[in-house]
Image (spheres, helix red, strand yellow):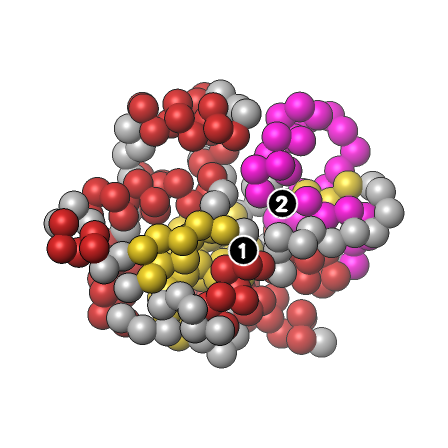
Amino acid sequence: MIFGSISYLNLLPFQVYLKRVLSNSQLKQIINSKKSTPSTINRAYKAKKIDAAFISSIKSRASKCTNLGIVSNGKVYSVLILPKDDAFDSESDTSNALSKVLNLNGEVIIGDKALRYYLSNPNANFKDLSYEWKKKRGLPFVFARLCYNKHSKKIKKLAKNFKGKQEKIPQYILKKEAKSRGITPKELKWYLNFIDYKLGYKELKALKLFLKKAKQ
């Protein structure tokens, strides 16, 4: 099974979970985790070069998906729009679409670079797209969904057993990941408090509304 993984901090708990549950050497041999940006993963998934992945919500409309995703309910600090000339982030499809749905103009930045920007400029003039959606719609926002082309039983089982933000991240991984992203372990743990993963009634309602508005 080829599993595509977004190379952002928001999926660190899931990546740790995979390492924990795939301890069986035989199972590890059939899993080849490929990390990249959301837009690259979307293209690979559509071309069926990967069997399963967290793909951007905007691209998940016709896909077979689980009720596991990347969700925020208010500020997320890693999907920002800056008061500059209009520019989309080439790494993201959903965030670019969200800026259009919200009728917000500026430069969209996402992921770790957006988080670093916020941490370095907490009082700067920017808008948090997740927060703007929450203000306007009163709902959480679903940035990505775990979808699959093959191996439905394995993927559904992984999704069902994942504990989300309760997944314990070992200190050595926290330190390693924080250092590689140019932030502190404390900042990393703080950021993950704003990420959820389970899609319940409100999350699915929000997803349906977003896809409807984006299509319009």
Label placed on residue 38: 1
Residue 126 showing in the rendered view: yes
Q: Nearer the viewer, residue 30 or 89?
A: 30
Q: Residue at x 31, y 32 (%)?
A: 169
Residues at circles 1 and 2 in contact by the CB criterion of under 8 Å: yes
Q: Residue furthest bottom?
A: 62
Q: Nearer the viewer, residue 124 or 63?
A: 63
Q: Which image quadrant is residue 69 in?
A: bottom left
Q: Position of residue 64 (x, y in %)?
A: 39, 75
Q: Which image quadrant is residue 126 in?
A: top right
Q: Residue at x 86, y 47 (%)?
A: 85
Q: Nearer the viewer, residue 59 or 98?
A: 59
Q: Tell me if residue 125 comes above or below residue 48 in the rendering.
A: above
Identify the amino acid type marked 2: Ile
Q: Magenta residues?
A: 103-131
- Crowd around label 2: few <14 · some 14–19 · many ≥20 (10 Å): many
